[in-house]
Image: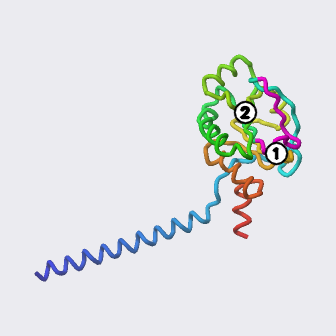
Amino acid sequence: MTLMSISMILLWAAVIALSLVVFALIRQIGLLHERIAPAGALSISKQGIKTGEAAPEFALQSLTDNKVHIGGVSIDKRSTLLFFLSDTCPVCKTLLPILKKLQGEEADWLSIVLASDGDIDEHKAFVAQAGLEKFDYVLSSQLGRGYEIGKLPYGVLIDEQGTLITHGLVNNREHLESFIQAKQLGVATVQEFATQQHH
């Protein structure tokens, strides 16, 4: 009975010790989560286009023959998310369902324009295959040069006054949603907001 009592006491002591360790680890994870800045779209430093300045203006025709105005004061008082993609880019394709969801959920203040360049017939086939008929889809190498797009997929958010809010590489859902957060928070990037909160 003595041995059994001692083993029970030791067992309970071990359980209590483990519980304290788990609690300490949970607390540390919480502290780390607070310190790590949210990962927004990767904004590449550029000589030309800068956040807070007027976005380059373009008047283009979409693949569905709609007139698309990019930059300048928005007629419908909505911001514009320019999403540069390629019909052969695997990452771009994984983001299309998220763009479709955003187009529905944020339609009251946001217009999404898909942008690329290349063969018009190939892109029309891509639009039909991927179910992108509800988007304005423009083909323009000048647009890509105007916004200095070097890598894909790339996003540019322009507000209703034609001001460039934020831009950056978009590799996942979190990056894409950071554009929405940047607009709501009134900052160029989510990282900028996190830095302000820590000062």
Bounds of the magenta segment: 65-80
Of circles 1 and 2, which is in front? Answer: 1
Residue 167 placement (x, y as % from top left) = 76, 45
Specify the principal SS of the magenta part. Answer: loop
In the rendered structure, which amino acid carries the disc numbered 2?
A: Leu
Between residue 107 and residue 91, name the one nearer to us: 107
* Vertical side of 184 occupied by 45: above or below: above
Query: Where is residue 32, by image quadrant?
Result: bottom right
Location of the N terminus by quadrant is bottom left
- Element marked by disc 2: strand
Q: Nearer the viewer, residue 137 or 110?
A: 110
**Position of residue 95 measured from the top left corner of the image (x, y, whole percent):** 62, 37
Which quarter of the image is occupied by the C terminus?
bottom right
Q: Mark 1 points at which residue?
A: 77
What residue sits right under mark 2 in the picture? Answer: 114
Disc nearer the start of the sequence (1/2): 1
Q: In this view, does 109 lie to the left or right of 161?
A: left
Q: Does the magenta stretch include residue 77?
A: yes
Q: Which residue is drawn at 80% across and 49% down?
A: 165
Question: Splitting the image into 4 quarters, where does residue 106 fall?
Answer: top right
Residue beneath the point at 78% across and 45% down? 79
> Toward the viewer: 60 or 48?
60
Q: In this view, does 59 lie to the left or right of 3?
A: right
Farthest residue to the top: give it.
121
Instruction: Write down the quadrant of residue 96 in the picture.
Output: top right
Image x and y of residue 48, in percent: 87, 43
Element at badge 1?
Answer: loop
